Image: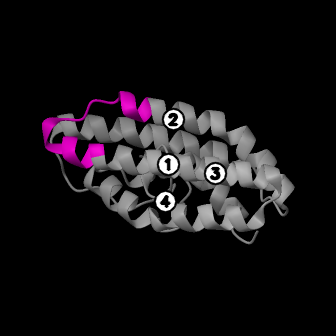
Amino acid sequence: MRRCLLVLVVVLAVAGCGSADAPKAPRIPAGQRQFSAALNVICRTGDLAAEQLGKPQTIGQMALGLSRTMPAAITEMRQTEALRPPAQLRSTFRRYVNISRHQLAFVTAMMKAAQAGNIAAFNRADRRLTALNTANDLSAEGLGAPYCMSMATGTPPTPGQTA
C-alpha cells in the first residue's frame, strides 16, 4: 500500500490528469493552444480532487477512496473524449484517449480487487496501469498538455503555477 496516494491520483489521471507543475509546452499555434489549455484544465481539476483524498493506508481505505473517485474519473474521461483536437493533434489525441481508456479499465480492476480485499489482483492491475504511464505521458506532452502527465513521471508542484 506504499503507493496508495499515487493510485488515487492515477484514478483521475485516466482522464489525463497528473502533475500540477510540468515542463512548459512548446510554442504552438492558437488553435492548438486553446485545445491544450482545455485539456490541461480537465487534468488540473482532477489533480485538485485527488489531492483532497489523503493517503490511504489499508486495502479497505483504498477501496473506499477508489469508489469515491471513480465517478469523477469517468466524468473527466467523458470530458476529454468530448474535446475536438486540431487536425495536427488528432492522431496523438486518439492515442492518448485510447491509453486513458485502458488506464480507466485497470483502475476499475484495482477498485474491484480492493473491494474484495484481493491484494494480489490489486497489485497486478496496478503494475499494468503503471506500465502505461510513459506512453500516456508522451502523448500528453505531444498534445502540449503537461498537466496531464502522470504524477509518477511529472514534476512536483510549484505553488502559484497555472496551466
Q: Is residue 24 left or right of residue 117?
A: left
Say whether disc 3 or disc 1 marks the residue closer to the N-terminus. 1
Amino acid found under the numbered disc labelled 4: Ser
> Quick one: label 1, few (<14), some, or many (20+) residues within 10 Å?
many
**Stretch of the chain drawn in magenta:** 79-94
Q: Is residue 53 left or right of residue 130?
A: right
What is the spatial separation of the Cα atoms under label 2 and label 4, in whole angstroms?
15 Å
Say whether disc 4 or disc 1 marks the residue closer to the N-terminus. 1
**Circle 1 residue:** 17
Depth check: 136 or 151 in front?
A: 136
What is the spatial separation of the Cα atoms under label 3 and label 1, in whole angstroms?
19 Å
**Circle 3 residue:** 109
> Which element carries disc 2, helix, strand or loop?
helix
Say whether disc 2 or disc 3 marks the residue closer to the N-terminus. 2
Would you say the magenta stretch is mainly helix, strand or loop?
helix
- Whether residue 93 is in magenta: the answer is yes
Q: Are marks 2 and 3 in contact (CB under 8 Å)?
A: no
**Circle 2 residue:** 76
- The spot of residue 157 in percent (x, y) is 54, 60
What is the spatial separation of the Cα atoms under label 3 and label 4, in whole angstroms?
19 Å
Q: Nearer the viewer, mark 3 or mark 1?
A: 3
Q: Tell me where residue 133 sits by quadrant.
A: bottom left
Measuring 56% from the left and 53% from the top, which residue is drawn there?
A: 106
> Quick one: label 3, few (<14), some, or many (20+) residues within 10 Å?
some
Amino acid found under the numbered disc labelled 1: Cys
Amino acid found under the numbered disc labelled 3: Ala
Q: Are marks 1 and 2 in contact (CB under 8 Å)?
A: yes
Q: Are marks 3 and 4 in contact (CB under 8 Å)?
A: no
> Quick one: label 4, few (<14), some, or many (20+) residues within 10 Å?
many
Q: Residue furthest toward the bottom?
A: 2
- The spot of residue 98 in percent (x, y) is 37, 46
